[in-house]
Amino acid sequence: MKKYLALILALLMTLSLVACGNGGDEGGDGKKEIAILVPNADHGWTGAVMTYAEETAAEINEAGTYSAKVITSTDANNQISQVEDLISNKSADAVVILPQDNTLEATMKKLADSGIPFVMFDRIIDSVSDKAVASVKGDNEGIGAETAKRFIADGLQPGDPILIMPGDNSSVPEMRNNGFFATLKENGWSDDQIAAIKSTDYTGWSRSEGKKLFTEWLEASTVEEITATKYIFTHDDEIAMGILEALKSSDIDEAKKEAFLNAGVNLGSSSGLNEIYSVLKGIHQKDYTAEVAKLADLFSVTYDPAMIKTAIGDMITHLDGGKVEQNHVIPVSVVDATNVNDFQGFGDAVSK
């Protein structure tokens, strides 16, 4: 009996050692586990990111070399808990993450110190970027720069009133504004003129919040101020759609709406939402033709959510032993009514 007990104990110890040796491999099949952390679909762009992440994870799992799982978070605190759980439980061998915002800085430092390789996507936390396998992002400064160049081509002069409608408190709006301001300075704007540029509160990348903040700006501004503001830089197509929806509603003072529509506004946004492409094509089912006709210019600078595939691909290359570009910036393009048919948007197409 003692001999049998000794054999059973030895077997259990062997199995225990094997299980410990699997590290982040939850399935116990020897495959390295890649955790892909993205926010829940709180608007069209992040919804598309989540969809592309899930598609890529399925492709990885089908290929069989690695195992991948997508973990979504409701807010920054939720994502912080998820990352810290991965670290403490050693439940992943690699991480690809779109941070909710900059409040993850301390947690990302813990991830960097843990030795788990990670790729950051879109919202880059600078203090840990040198420890990342790669920081993959669209050219956020390029979005700001291209918007400023377009406004200047449309007639913007140093000191002209501009309204900015930013996304949130992450690195993304900061970089977009930096690119915008740097280009203005290169074209004769002074620091004081740039400091005088007005900005709304953060929109949270939300169409409804963009609509609300735009309406509040109209209400708080005089007809003369509205008429003088001919350049509006929104950080996302959802925000631009919020402006168009506000103009179509009956919630705005009629005199101020007319002042805005007759000002000859140049409206710039970014991302590549199919809805804004439908507006540019003149086929949106809500028919914004009249509103767009009153605008002097409407354009969107690309920021493709499919870049998450590039971020995940960079991690695969790293795990395969390949070389990865640590600061991986994806170029941008300006889309307007003249070239919109050359671009593929994301989200549902909304047409007549």
Image: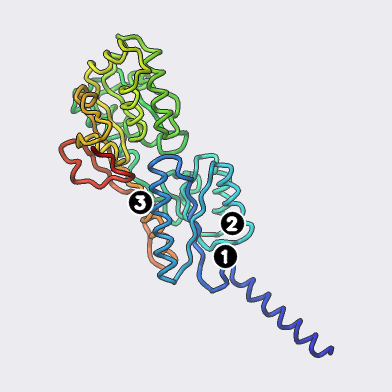
Q: Residues within 10 Å of mark 2 (few under 14, many from 20)?
A: some
Residue type, label 1: Gly
Circles 2 and 1: CB atoms closer than 8 Å: yes
Q: In the rendered image, which residue does mark 1 sit on?
A: 24
Q: Which residue, as the protein is rendered here, is positioned at the far left?
A: 338
Q: Residue at x 24, y 24 (%)?
A: 291
Expressed as whole percent of the image width and height from the top left, the position of residue 320 reads 42, 68
Q: Residue at x 42, y 65 (%)?
A: 60
Q: Which residue is mark 3?
A: 307
Residue drawn at x 24%, y 22% is 265
Q: Position of residue 279 (x, y in %)?
A: 24, 34
From mark 3 to mark 2, how far is it between C-alphas? 24 Å
Percent x, y for residue 59? 39, 64
Q: How far is mark 1 from mark 3, CA to CA?
A: 26 Å
Q: Which residue has dot 2 on it?
A: 86
Instruction: From the viewer's perspective, tell me whether residue 288 is left or right of residue 2.
Output: left
Mark 1 touching mark 3, by CB under 8 A? no
What type is the residue that disc 3 sits on?
Answer: Met
Of the two numbered discs 1 and 3 on the same chain, state the one appearing first in sequence. Answer: 1
Is residue 165 among what the camera can see?
yes
The answer to which quarter of the image holds residue 238 is top left
> As displayed, is residue 153 above or below residue 281?
above
Q: Nearer the viewer, residue 262 or 107?
A: 262
